[in-house]
């Protein structure tokens, strides 16, 4: 049979009309692998479309920096492990990056500081009702992903933190998808307002994912795990707030 409609055109039409489910039904006779292939390509295309519409969030000036930037959630992880790390100014600490990667990494703070950095002044919005403006300097997460080489099936990046939530003792963790992970303003910050990141704000390293609100910006990041699904982490909803407070996983702003 001749097919005048290329897959690309078909997918473009489907994307704009939202007829993917209908397509799946029409395609019932196709082998499952073809369906999966089609679905994957559709997902990729949607991601590209979204990415094209996702500019940088607004960056502000030095004069805009808040005189007082509140701390929220954990303000100092409890326990001997963190206390010893602080005593030694985090010289013994390593950021581990593992999971679905070809090159697992264990990087010292000194090594992280030698990587190309980005500095940005942005507004932080917490859904508990406050905002503050701060300057963040750190390594783009995209750069770390370049180094560890995620595998073909990688889809999410999980941030395991050094603290547990005071309310229930469960470890704090968060996750984002690869699209947000490679956004240019998604960085792992080690400096705030021109000085070393304070303990209250997440030392030695905290995520700044400027596309999303407060709780996604994990402090005290200790380990980054690349995964293909979130169901196996914590209670399976992608973060402490998501698992225990039913907060939405995608907290875009
Ligand atoms: N590890 C960890 N990260 C965390 C939290 C926390 O309790 N533990 N709180 C979150 C919330 S709700 C907010 S608003 C911000 C607060 O960051 P700040 O203390 O630098 O203002 O961190 C987020 N990241
Ligand atoms: Mo928050």
Image (cartoon, helix red, strand yellow):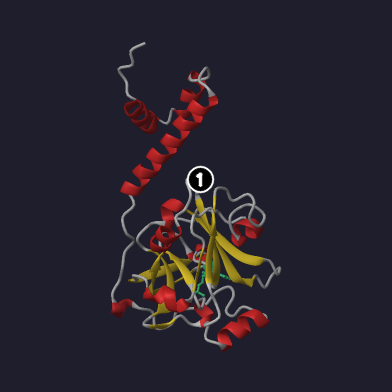
Please tell me in which quadrant of the rendered image residue 72 appears: bottom right
Horizontal side of residue 4 vs 157, given as left or right: left
Which residue is located at x 58 percent, y 56 percent?
247
Q: In this orientation, which residue lies closer to the viewer: 181 or 98?
A: 98
Ligand 1 contact, mark 1 (Cβ < 8 Å): no
Tell me, yes or no, if residue 128 can be seen here: no
Locate residue 10, reporting x and y percent: 36, 26
Q: How many marks?
A: 1
Tell me the quarter of the image containing the C terminus: bottom left
Which residue is located at x 54 percent, y 73 percent?
220
Which residue is located at x 30 percent, y 17 percent?
4
The residue at which mark 1 appears reads as 153
Tell me, yes or no, if residue 31 can be seen here: yes
Tell me the quarter of the image containing the N terminus: top left
Locate residue 77, reporting x and y percent: 62, 78
Q: In this orientation, which residue lies closer to the viewer: 194 or 104?
A: 104
Q: In this orientation, which residue lies closer to the viewer: 33 or 184?
A: 33
Label 1: element kind: loop
């Amino acid at each position: 049979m001749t097919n005048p409609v290329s897959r690309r055109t078909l997918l473009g039409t489907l994307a704009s009309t939202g007829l993917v489910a209908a397509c799946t039904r029409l395609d019932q006779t196709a082998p499952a692998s073809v369906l999966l292939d089609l679905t994957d390509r559709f997902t990729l295309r949607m991601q590209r479309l979204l990415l094209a519409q996702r500019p940088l969030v607004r960056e502000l000036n030095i004069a805009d920096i808040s005189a007082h930037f509140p701390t929220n959630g954990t303000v100092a992880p409890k326990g001997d492990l963190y206390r010893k790390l602080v005593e030694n100014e985090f010289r013994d600490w390593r950021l581990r990056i593992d999971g679905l990667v070809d090159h697992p990494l264990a990087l010292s703070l000194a090594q992280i500081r030698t990587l190309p950095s980005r500095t940005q002044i942005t507004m932080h919005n917490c859904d508990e009702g406050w905002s503050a403006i701060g300057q963040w300097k750190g390594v783009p997460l995209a750069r770390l992903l370049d180094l560890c080489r995620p595998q073909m099936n990688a889809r999410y990046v999980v941030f395991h933190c050094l603290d547990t939530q005071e309310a229930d003792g469960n470890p704090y963790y968060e996750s984002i998808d690869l699209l947000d992970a490679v956004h240019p303003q998604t960085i792992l910050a080690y400096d705030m307002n021109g000085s070393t990141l304070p303990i209250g704000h997440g030392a030695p390293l905290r995520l700044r994912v400027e596309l999303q609100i407060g709780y996604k910006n994990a402090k005290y990041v200790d380990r980054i795990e690349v995964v293909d699904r979130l169901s196996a982490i914590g209670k399976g909803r992608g973060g402490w707030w998501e698992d225990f407070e039913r907060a939405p996983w995608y907290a875009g702003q």
